[in-house]
Image (cartoon, rainbow, N blue to C red):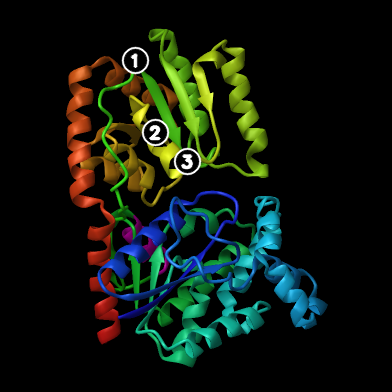
Amino acid sequence: MRIIHLTPGTGSFHCGSCHRDNHLMKALRARGHDVTMVPLYLPLITDGESASPELPVFAGGINLFLKQKLPIFRKAPAWLLRWLDSPKMLLRAAKRAGMTSPRQLGEMTLESFRGVTGKQAEDWVRLVDWIGQTGKPDVLSLSNGLLNGLAVAAQRELDVPVVCSLQGEDSFLDTLPEPYRAESWRLFRENSAAVRTYVATSEYYARVMKERLELSPEKVVAVRNGLDLTAYTRQATAPQPPVIGYLARQIAGKGLHTLVDAFLIVAKELPDLRLSIAGTATIADEKFITQQQRKLKDAGLWDRVTWRRDLTLEEKIAHFQSLTVLSVPAGYGEAFGLYVVEALACGVPVVEPDHAGLGELVRATCGGLLCKVNDPVSLASELARLLTDATLRQSLADSGYASSQRDYTAARMAGDFEAVLTRAAER
């Protein structure tokens, strides 16, 4: 089967959706499919070799932004557009990620849903033409629902079935100011008529998006995420002194402040306890990060804290293996949580909020404990319980590790996703 998969890049930081897409496309290729993974907006940043490292970025983020803000720029010469789409310029722009205003984000998002009928039409038409010229695929796969404006053009111009993944779009769209929020949701629902099948990353998120998009039950299927876990090895022994770890974007939405507050509580009971924070951050996150670090310094605990930014794959695995427990207590409706699978694959149990996709994942793997959402006291209680009960910790680590190897591999994910693609292509 010939598959073209479109996925937005970040250009400067690691993204769970990018990792999932890259692992999925490489696993589909290993199953014998002809797969092309096309980066959009900014270069892809992955934890390994990209599935299609040779492809340029389509619909470059700088060009889209300038055309959105300056109508005259839509008549810019080709040489200028090519220069702005160069990797050097896109990577430079990516360093300013997070500096766009909510209103600008709303405008850009709305135009993306409008696809070839909006202000970004020139770039989306060019992409659709390129897809047709390179050999019409059997299926066009979209990384997330924010791209579903392309589904309309693909159906009309190429007569290609579209499969679209759902990876947490609601948490982004609901933060947009009006009128962009309501209008984006309206177009999201309207464009869904051109999508053959939506693929949610958890049963929880499939239920949420069926309701939000007003879809029939058969329109959305759940395919659990997975990763190529070959490089992930189980830690030999739990570290001493004990370490609570975090690996995700360093923002309030991921619950970093909740974890810091919980650590302040547990550290009073366990005087040798350590905290290890890692994950991506943008310029816009600096104020929040400084606030959390200040709390730790004011409490006299900074000497027990390790705080790092983006990690390579090797560094990430070493980070997991250095932990006693992982917790990313996201307060919003997290659709999945790949960091949970990564921790379990290293033999590290988790404590997560009993909420959304995280609660579903912890129950499915039996690899951790659940706490109340946005509640540092509840989180501290469950962390202390796991840290002080070696038998419980070992049992959770064993169950979680076995589940990661059985149920959350890239090969298993690709097999399930392949079945969805096959049904879509045969209709």
Membership of 207 in magenta stretch: yes
Q: Between residues 289 and 55, which one lies in front from this camera angle?
A: 55
- Quadrant where the N terminus lies? bottom left
Q: Between residues 157 and 232, which one lies in front from this camera angle?
A: 232
User: For the residues carrying marks 2 and 3, which lies nearer the camera in this image?
Assistant: 2
Q: Which residue is mark 3?
A: 248
Which amino acid, mark 1? Gln
Residue for point 46% across, 22% down: 275
Q: Secondary structure at mark 2?
A: helix
Q: Secondary structure at mark 3?
A: loop
Q: Which mark is residue 240?
A: 1
Q: Which mark is residue 18?
A: none
Q: Is residue 183 above or below residue 78?
A: above
Membership of 100 in magenta stretch: no
Q: Which residue is mark 2?
A: 318
Q: CA distance from mark 2 to mark 1?
A: 15 Å
Whether residue 114 can be seen here: yes
Q: Between residues 89 and 76, which one lies in front from this camera angle?
A: 89
User: For the residues carrying marks 2 and 1, which lies nearer the camera in this image?
Assistant: 2
Q: Where does residue 308 sit, x and y in percent of width and height?
A: 54, 32
Mark 2 or mark 3, earlier in chain: 3
Q: Where does residue 215 sit, x and y in percent of width and height?
A: 35, 72
Q: Where does residue 264 sit, x and y in percent of width and height?
A: 48, 17
Main SS type for the magenta part? helix
Mark 1 or mark 3, earlier in chain: 1
Which amino acid, mark 2? Ala
User: For the residues carrying marks 1 and 3, which lies nearer the camera in this image?
Assistant: 1
Whether residue 364 can be seen here: no
Toward which corner of the image does residue 121 lie, by quadrant?
bottom right
Is 351 situated left or right of 398 in this image? right
Q: Which residues are magenta?
A: 205-213
Is 320 situated left or right of 222 in this image? right
